[in-house]
Image: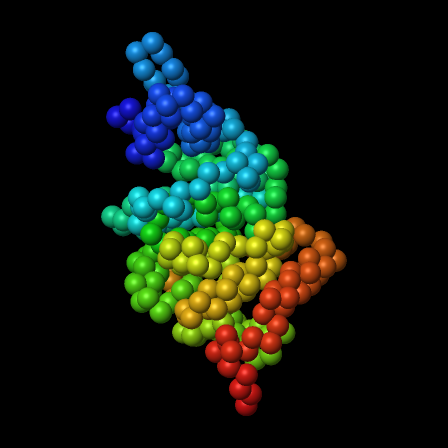
């Protein structure tokens, strides 16, 4: 198993232990986790052999079937998270751009493929092909379960790195008072209207590119699965991070924003309806919480 990732090796060894203990149900579950990672266990008379599954046709999973690594120690410096609900070419462009500027750090790319495409992804990209599209929140959470980096970067396919992005983000998150950061910040004075802000202190980081320490997820939780559309899911998550006593800050980084395909290709009536529903979901939890805002309830 010299070319097999350490995570897979550990699961195979654990499965062998479970089989020797005649705990076959647990052994089968461990085998399924290995399969979800793109490998197959072949049992022989002399032991178990691990084979790589063909990447072109990954097993399609339900969100509940995606195993989590969040209870394990990080194995990468950064985990970059992509959600494909269509237009996979945008994500391919994004991955290539980040790789051009990642430097010597170890970077894990996780692609949640929820569009049904059978595109061939770059080498070393972890692909989670889902049976269908569970929505933005649940899709993002599938990727977050697989985050192996100490720093997690959630990126939209419309964003292209044009220079060093990860260094400034890592530097910002080295400050333990910072909970979430990114280049696109917003603030509010009434929890009804949000406006773009250069910060550095802001009320929320927009989900086009937002980053946080992996360990924050154990306290804040992941995105709300009920956000099937992307709008306001980033605000709700940012406020949950700020509720922990952490800050949201803008980090200027060199990126280019292309057309946001989901927004442009969703009919206006549907955009309005879904956006309104999501915003009310945010207000359900944070109505009146001006104490979490930069303005703190103060008006001019």
Q: Quadrant of the C terminus?
A: bottom right
State which quarter of the image contains the N terminus: top left
Name the residue furthest front: 21
Query: Percent x, y for residue 131?
Result: 59, 34
Between 214 and 259, the residue placed more toward the observer is 214
Q: Residue furthest bottom?
A: 300
How many numbered circles are shown? 0
- Can residue 260 be seen in this snapshot? no
Counting from the top left corner in percent of width and height, residue 109 is at 40, 43
Q: Residue 178's spot in the image, x, y percent?
A: 37, 67
Comparing 110 with 237, the one in front is 237
Q: Is residue 192 visible?
A: yes
Report the residue at 46% width, 64% height from top: 241
Q: Residue furthest top?
A: 45
Estimate the x, y position of residue 112 in percent, counting from the top left: 50, 41
Q: Is residue 38 above or below residue 162?
A: above
In this picture, is 253 found above or below 98? below
Q: Looking at the image, what colour scheme do you see? A: rainbow
Horizontal arrangement in the rendering, residue 82 relative to residue 214 (left or right): right
Left/right placement of residue 135 relative to residue 124 reads: right
Residue occupying image coordinates x 30% and y 11% = 46
For this orientation, the residue located farthest to the right is 269
Q: Nearer the viewer, residue 204 or 195?
A: 204
Residue at the (42%, 37%) spot, across then down? 126
Between 201 and 214, the one lying in front of the other is 214
Name the quadrant containing residue 165.
bottom left
Residue at x-position 44% and y-position 28%:
26
- Position of residue 116 in the picture relative to residue 52 (left or right): right
Image: 290 above or below 175: below
């Amino acid at each position: 198993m010299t070319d097999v990732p350490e995570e897979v090796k550990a699961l195979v060894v654990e499965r062998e232990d479970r089989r020797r203990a005649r705990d076959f149900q647990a052994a089968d579950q461990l085998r399924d986790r290995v399969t979800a990672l793109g490998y197959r266990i072949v049992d022989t008379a002399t032991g178990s052999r691990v084979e790589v599954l063909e990447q072109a046709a990954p097993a399609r999973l339900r969100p509940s079937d995606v195993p989590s690594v969040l209870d394990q120690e990080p194995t990468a410096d950064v985990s970059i998270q992509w959600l494909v609900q269509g237009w996979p070419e945008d994500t391919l462009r994004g991955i290539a751009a980040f790789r051009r500027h990642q430097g010597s750090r170890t970077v894990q790319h996780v692609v949640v493929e929820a569009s049904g495409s059978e595109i061939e992804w770059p080498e070393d990209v972890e692909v989670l092909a889902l049976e269908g599209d569970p929505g933005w929140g649940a899709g993002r959470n599938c990727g977050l379960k697989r985050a192996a980096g100490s720093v997690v970067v959630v990126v939209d396919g419309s964003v292209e790195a044009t220079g060093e992005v990860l260094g400034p983000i890592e530097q910002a998150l080295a400050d333990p008072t910072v909970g979430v950061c990114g280049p696109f910040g917003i603030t509010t004075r009434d929890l009804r209207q949000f406006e773009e802000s250069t910060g550095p202190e802001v009320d929320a980081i927009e989900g086009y590119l937002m980053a946080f320490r992996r360990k924050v997820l154990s306290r804040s939780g992941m995105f709300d699965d009920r956000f099937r559309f992307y709008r306001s899911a980033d605000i709700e998550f940012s406020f949950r991070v700020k509720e922990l006593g952490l800050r949201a800050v803008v980090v200027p980084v060199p990126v280019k924003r292309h057309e946001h395909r989901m927004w442009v290709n969703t009919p206006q009536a549907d955009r309005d309806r879904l956006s309104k529903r999501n915003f009310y979901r945010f207000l359900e939890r944070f109505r009146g919480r001006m104490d979490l805002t930069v303005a703190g309830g103060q008006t001019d």
